[in-house]
Image (spheres, grey):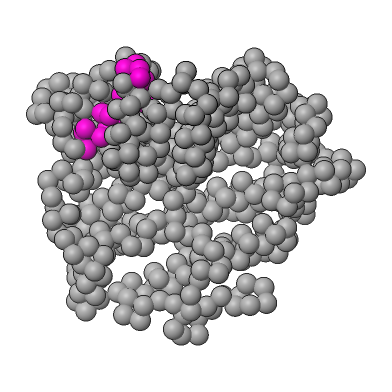
């Protein structure tokens, strides 16, 4: 499961530690001090990462507290001072659009290189968040302040009243959206529906507006209309995993609202929480739901199995998936999770059996990809290749399909790997694999770019330090290369076995 921007960029201000030197970043009246290992092989990257973290933390904290003008200034300063890095620019471009800082989002987008890695995300950001026309900075800050008041500071009623009584930014469809959001948060559903209709009439492309409309209709006891809007939302052609997940979360929320039976409501609410990276809350709701009704026990067990599987708890995942399958052998989540577990345990015949069962229960490509990779693992190469070839013609932008296809068509790695990165920028394995490819090609500058992306996602990945050591050695810096290798072995003493073990990762083939 993908998590929205799985960066190690966003950190609590209180969690920042002290820098050994005089390096610091101001956050209001108190400086945040940062520390880096004095013997770090990648000191320049560490310092750059520390700067980005601290500056972002300051700006984000101010936004949450309602100090929106100062937050805008902080984010703007970060953008002006940040070293060119498509990954960071794209990640923050999404966040700025969410906050309503459309000028900063556009500034970040305009800084991006026009390449395969960025184009899908740029399209999806604009389609999901952007108003019909760009506002001036004064209006942007005014409306962003309203968003912060409604969403983060429990000021929905006061903020909505202010928006209604002001003529500022009247020409923007985004203002109507915020008024609708304010009425929705204060439970005035009739007025919320009126203003979201105004927003969608002015801008029928913005999917975020459509999602709010579906929620308002669901809360207004108009389930048929809510589901109709939801069907339109699901037709939005989002390429990236991040925005596909936003649509899935909206779907589960609406289904939660329109469900009649309490256990079924709990099921969809839990799925929504899980998609929002609140899996602990999801499991609590599901465990409570089990006690309420036996009619939905199979569904609840199936979802529990998936939640545990996605959170790397295979024993619990197996237990609940088996219980779900026992309750109902046609439970899709149970079949798929059991297939995934058996595949990871190298019980490929069992995995194939459950993937085939899951295929009969859905139109999703997941079981088909599972069948194809199971055939390959069972050395049924002809069947696997035939199925991958067929699927690639129809689902060329499916991340899991492309990942699996790397084993079948390794000669297409230079086509497939960049495409995977363009669908899911937080897939750390892809950046590491691209770095590995670049190293093999002798393109060490490009390898460093890919490794920088990997560092932002997970600064403690042992593979990052292994590949960095190779780059540094090629550049003649043997001392730093050795330091990086030491760091690699500190993180994973058995790194060579983990890195080169057959079947460890398709990316490094």
Residue that lies at the very extreme toward the bottom in this rendered image: 21
332 is within the stretch colored magenta = yes
Residue at left offset 47%, top offset 35%: 287
- Please give the range of residues in magenta: 327-344
Residue at left offset 50%, top offset 51%: 91
Determine if residue 321 is in view: yes
Q: Which percent across, then down, holds residue 72?
A: 67, 60
Q: Residue 163 falls in which quadrant of the image?
A: top right
14 is within the stretch colored magenta = no
Q: Which percent across, then down, holds residue 98?
A: 61, 46
Q: Which percent across, then down, holds residue 127?
A: 58, 35
Query: Does residue 415 sit above or below 88 in this rendering?
Result: above
Residue at left offset 14%, top offset 52%: 500
**The N terminus lies in which quarter of the figure?**
top left
Q: Which percent across, then down, holds residue 185?
A: 74, 38
Q: Nearer the viewer, residue 438 or 53?
A: 53
Q: Main secondary structure of the magenta part?
A: helix
Q: Nearer the viewer, residue 298 or 13?
A: 298
Q: Is residue 473 left or right of residue 259?
A: left
Determine if residue 236 is in view: no
Residue that lies at the very extreme toward the left in this rendered image: 379
Residue at left offset 35%, top offset 81%: 38
Q: Nearer the viewer, residue 69 or 295?
A: 295
């Amino acid at each position: 499961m993908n998590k929205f921007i799985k960066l190690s960029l966003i950190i609590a201000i209180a969690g920042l530690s002290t820098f050994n030197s005089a390096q610091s970043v101001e956050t209001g009246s108190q400086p945040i001090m940062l520390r880096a290992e004095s013997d770090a092989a990648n000191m320049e990257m560490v310092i750059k990462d520390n700067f980005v973290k601290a500056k972002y933390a300051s700006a984000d904290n101010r936004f949450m507290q309602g100090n929106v003008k100062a937050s805008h200034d902080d984010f703007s300063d970060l953008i002006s001072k940040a070293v060119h890095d498509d990954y960071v620019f794209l990640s923050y471009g999404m966040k700025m659009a969410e906050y309503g800082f459309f000028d900063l989002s556009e500034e970040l987008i305009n800084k991006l290189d026009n390449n395969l890695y960025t184009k899908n995300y740029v399209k999806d950001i604009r389609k999901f968040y952007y108003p019909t026309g760009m506002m001036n900075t004064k209006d942007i800050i005014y409306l962003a302040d309203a968003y912060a008041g409604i969403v983060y500071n429990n000021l929905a009623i006061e903020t909505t009243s202010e928006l209604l009584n002001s003529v500022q930014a009247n020409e923007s469809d985004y203002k109507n959206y915020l008024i609708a959001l304010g009425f929705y948060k204060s439970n005035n559903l009739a007025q919320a529906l009126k203003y979201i209709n105004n927003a969608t009439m002015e801008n029928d492309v913005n999917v975020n507006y459509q999602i709010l409309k579906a929620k308002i209709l669901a809360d207004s006891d108009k389930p048929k209309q809510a589901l109709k809007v939801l069907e339109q939302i699901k037709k939005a052609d989002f390429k990236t995993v991040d925005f596909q997940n936003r649509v899935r979360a909206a779907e589960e929320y609406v289904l939660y609202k329109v469900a009649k039976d309490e256990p079924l409501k709990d099921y969809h609410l839990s799925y929504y929480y899980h998609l929002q990276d609140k899996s602990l809350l999801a499991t609590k709701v599901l465990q409570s739901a089990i006690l309420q009704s036996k009619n939905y026990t199979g569904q609840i067990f199936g979802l529990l199995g998936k939640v545990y599987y996605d959170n790397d708890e295979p024993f619990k995942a197996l237990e609940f998936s088996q219980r779900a399958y026992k309750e109902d052998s046609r439970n899709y989540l149970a079949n798929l999770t059991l297939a995934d577990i058996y595949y990871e345990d190298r019980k490929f015949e069992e995995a194939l059996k459950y993937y085939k069962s899951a295929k009969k229960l859905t139109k999703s490509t997941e079981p088909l990809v599972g069948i194809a990779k199971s055939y390959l693992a069972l050395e049924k190469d002809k069947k696997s290749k035939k199925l991958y070839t067929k699927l690639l013609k129809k689902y060329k932008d499916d991340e899991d399909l492309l990942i699996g296809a790397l084993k079948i068509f390794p000669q297409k790695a230079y086509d497939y790997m960049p495409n995977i990165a363009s669908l899911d920028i937080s897939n750390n394995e892809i950046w590491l694999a691209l770095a590995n490819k670049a190293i093999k090609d002798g393109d060490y500058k490009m390898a460093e770019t890919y490794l920088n992306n990997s560092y932002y996602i997970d600064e403690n990945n042992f593979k990052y330090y292994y590949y960095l050591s190779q780059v540094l050695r090629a550049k003649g810096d043997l001392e730093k290369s050795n330091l990086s290798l030491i760091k690699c072995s500190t993180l994973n003493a058995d790194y060579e076995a983990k890195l080169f073990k057959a079947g460890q990762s398709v990316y490094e083939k």
